Amino acid sequence: MIGDGMGIAQITASMYLNRKGSYLEQFPVVGFQKTFSGDNIITDSAAGATAMACGVKTYNNAIGVDMDTLPVQSILELSEKNGLATGLIATSPITHATPASFISHVSHRQFMEEIALGFMDTKIDFFVGGGKRYFDRRESDERNLYQELKDDGYYVSDYFKKDIFETHISSKKNFVFFTGDEDPQQARNGRKYLPYISSKGATFLKKRNDKGFFLMIEGSQIDWGGHQNDASWLISEMDDFNTAIGRILKFAKKEGETLVIVTADHECGGFSINNGSTKSELVTAFTNNGHTADMVPVFAFGPQAELFHGIYDNTDIFRKMKKALQFD
């Protein structure tokens, strides 16, 4: 699970907002990752996510490619190759930098329609997020990827047709649901699907086969609140992500064979909790409206969690996941 833009202060903030405290307190292993990219001490989401997903340092804006723009196999693709079920969930367009880096290979993150084509090159079992327009109303070609997915046997629906909470999710068919034409709503404006669909997604993928599954869940808009220096937006997204973590932990504790990793591509905004803060009211501040080079915490729970202890490069997360999944 990735809370995009999640730094130590954001994690602390979520503890105040949830009466039960932060679910991160239940993780027995904590490490730290260094997030610098291949061409900058300050990473962007694309290079940061590619490092974790594919195990290479690359230039800012790169999606699943190395410094020479050559494609690099991701942990999701390796999981599929090894017979595992796979899934992606985001509160951004599903073609946004972080989810894209796990499934596409594109020279620049802004090429959303090209990124969408990456979904057609896999048999991903489950994905939920915004970005419907990059599939069904494309400008670069006349393809309708929404219909192509349906023709390929996927269940495909979207926010305009029905509420995701009223959608029947059967593990008999690959599942796709678009939660926005571009960006989904903010949590503080009524978006509620992340905790629900995170739990549903894990249950769905477990039923798909007996070899296991890989699922990446992103609380995408934590980063967006940081960029806007909007503490209310950031904290409401962190609280939503915290609830999703709780649902996944509940699943993992009951299931007994699931490794849960919580981290982020980078920190954003230099967000801090200042003097005068109380548990019911925070006094916050930002140092800037961009990313920082702060190390990012890595929380791990479940089998092989001990692999994630210590301080390491973000590329090591890929290698540690490979080892935990026994792909080596």
Image (cartoon, rainbow, N blue to C red):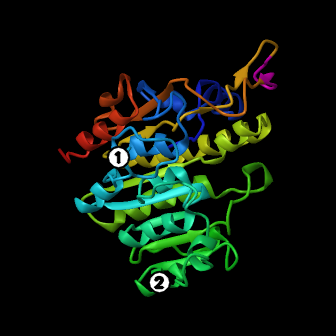
Mark found first going from the N terminus, 1 or 2: 1
Q: Residue at x 55, y 23 (%)?
A: 294
**Magenta-colored stretch includes residue 122:** no
Please name whichever residue, 315 or 62, is drawn nearer the observer in this view of the structure. 62
**Res. 128 image quadrant:** bottom right
Give left or right: position of 272 versus 37: right
Image quarter in which the C terminus is found: top left
- Tell me which amino acid carries mark 2: Glu
Q: Which residue is mark 1?
A: 54
Residue 47 at x, y = what percent?
47, 42
In terms of secondary structure, where does tag 2 sit? helix
- The stretch of residues the image draws in magenta is 277-284
> Looking at the image, is 12 positioned above or below residue 179?
above
Q: Residue at x 67, y 25 (%)?
A: 270
**Magenta-colored stretch includes residue 281:** yes
- Residue 263: image tag: none
In terms of secondary structure, where does tag 1 sit? helix
Give left or right: position of 45 versus 277: left
> Looking at the image, is 61 positioned above or below residue 281?
below
Q: Residue at x 67, y 64 (%)?
A: 182
Residue 275 at x, y = what percent?
78, 12
Please name whichever residue, 280 or 63, is drawn nearer the observer in this view of the structure. 63
Asked whether the residues under the numbered discs 1 and 2 touch, taking CB atoms below 8 Å apart as contact, a structural biologist would say no
Residue 257 at x, y = what percent?
30, 46
The number of callouts visible is: 2
Please name whichever residue, 128 or 285, is drawn nearer the observer in this view of the structure. 285
Q: Which residue is mark 2?
A: 148
What whole-number distance in Å separates the C-alpha atoms at marks 1 and 2? 27 Å
Residue 58 at x, y = what percent?
41, 41
Query: Overall secondary structure of the magenta stretch?
Result: loop
**Mark 1: few/some/many CA within 10 Å (<14, 14-19, 20+):** many
Please name whichever residue, 59 or 6, is drawn nearer the observer in this view of the structure. 59
